[in-house]
Image: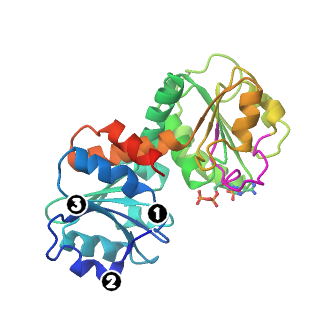
């Protein structure tokens, strides 16, 4: 799929009837689905502009911001591996993004000053409401892979929502020990009725994880296990019960081994397409200050 290099930006909007005003940066960036999501939305809002992919090498994100502002870009999405570098390069970062340690959305002001946001966490709240008809704030939540980028954003959002209980599991448990210092202070109060700490941390494979997961309503996979057809389930499927809501942040394949197992055990399931949709919708709302045309964006994603 088409993309631009950072060094091609100076020419970006020369003589273009429809200027590029929004972009995604990443490395690689060719696979990004953001244009499929955002171009139909920009067209529906009649903003007469394009959304482009720009490949930015690591270490050049601040330079990219400057060049993009000069080329007439108004807002950016940030994808792997630039979410931390983007946070460091922003003039202002909102509180949620700071706590998540990652920025995925940038808004430029007219002087080129940058404000960074993270829409993955808030987008997940909307995704859960859409898929399961419930508020994340009311759920006891288990996150498998909480030490990865998506896992940390969702875990932080659960704390900001004041979820009654949060069970975090990761292969590398030291990553969660680091997160505990940030998350623990967010979960002060006594919202949890019943035994156990509000924030619980486990190594993936710890036998004690079984009971902790059983007590949760929502189980989320944020590991990359499931992207390949041969991948196993990231969680022993015997732990999944009919009362569980099971969300896999992976959307390709649409039904991972985890989701198939959860379905066969009578649990309700959803995949990461709704997160992709709603994090994008929130970015667009930051850029345009208008409600996102969700159905146009959903339709765009259905073309993939
Ligand atoms: P990021 O999201 O930060 O880019 P990633 O390498 O894609 O990171 O990994 C995302 C998550 O999948 C992490 O929680 C990672 O566990 P570690 O923190 O221990 O690396 C998890 N993950 C990836 N492969 C895994 C595997 N084979 N077994 C268990 N967890 C795995």
Q: Residues within 10 Å of mark 1 (few under 14, many from 20)?
A: some
Q: CA distance from mark 3 to mark 1?
A: 20 Å
Observer-side mark, 3 or 1, equals 3
Relative image position of residue 133 (x, y in whole percent):
50, 22
Question: What residue is shown at x 86% (from left), y 38% (from top)?
Answer: 207
Question: What residue is shown at x 74% (from left), y 43% (from top)?
Answer: 257
Find residue 7 and name its label: 2
The answer to whether residue 104 shows anywhere in this view is no
Left or right, residue 177 beside residue 10? right
Find residue 84 and name its label: 1
Figure label count: 3
Q: Which residues are magenta?
A: 220-235
Position of 262 relative to 285 (above/below):
above
As drawn, the residue found furthest toward the bottom would be: 7
Tag 1, which secondary structure? Answer: helix
Mark 3 lies within 8 Å of ligand 1 (Cβ measured): no
Q: Main secondary structure of the magenta part?
A: loop
Query: Does the magenta portion include 223?
Result: yes
Position of 184 relative to 26 (above/below):
above
Tag 3, which secondary structure? Answer: loop
């Amino acid at each position: 799929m088409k993309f631009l290099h950072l060094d091609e930006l100076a020419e970006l909007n020369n003589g273009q009837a429809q200027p590029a005003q929004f972009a995604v940066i990443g490395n690689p960036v060719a696979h990004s689905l953001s244009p499929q999501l955002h171009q139909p939305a920009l067209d529906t809002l009649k903003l007469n502009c394009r959304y482009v992919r720009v490949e930015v090498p690591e270490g050049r994100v601040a330079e990219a911001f400057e060049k993009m502002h000069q080329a007439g870009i108004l807002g950016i999405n940030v994808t792997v591996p630039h979410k931390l570098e983007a946070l460091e390069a922003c003039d202002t970062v909102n509180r949620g993004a700071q706590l998540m340690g990652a920025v995925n959305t940038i808004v430029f002001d007219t002087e080129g000053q940058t404000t960074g946001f993270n829409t993955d966490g808030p987008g997940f709240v909307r995704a859960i409401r859409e898929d399961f008809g419930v508020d994340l704030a009311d759920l006891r939540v288990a996150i498998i892979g909480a030490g990865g980028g998506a896992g940390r954003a969702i875990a932080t959002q659960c704390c900001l929502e004041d979820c009654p209980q949060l069970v975090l599991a990761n292969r590398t448990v030291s990553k969660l020990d680091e997160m505990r210092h940030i998350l623990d202070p967010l979960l002060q109060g006594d919202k949890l009725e019943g035994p156990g700490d509000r924030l619980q941390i486990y190594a993936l494979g710890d036998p004690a994880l079984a009971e902790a997961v059983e007590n949760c309503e929502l189980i989320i996979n944020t590991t990359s296990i499931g992207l390949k057809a041969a991948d196993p389930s990231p969680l022993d499927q015997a732990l999944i019960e009919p009362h569980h809501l099971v969300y896999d942040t992976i959307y390709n394949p649409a039904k991972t081994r985890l989701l198939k197992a959860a379905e066969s055990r009578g649990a309700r399931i959803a995949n990461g397409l709704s997160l992709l949709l709603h994090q994008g919708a929130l970015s667009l709302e930051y850029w345009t200050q208008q409600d996102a045309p969700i159905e146009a964006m959903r339709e765009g994603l259905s073309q993939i």
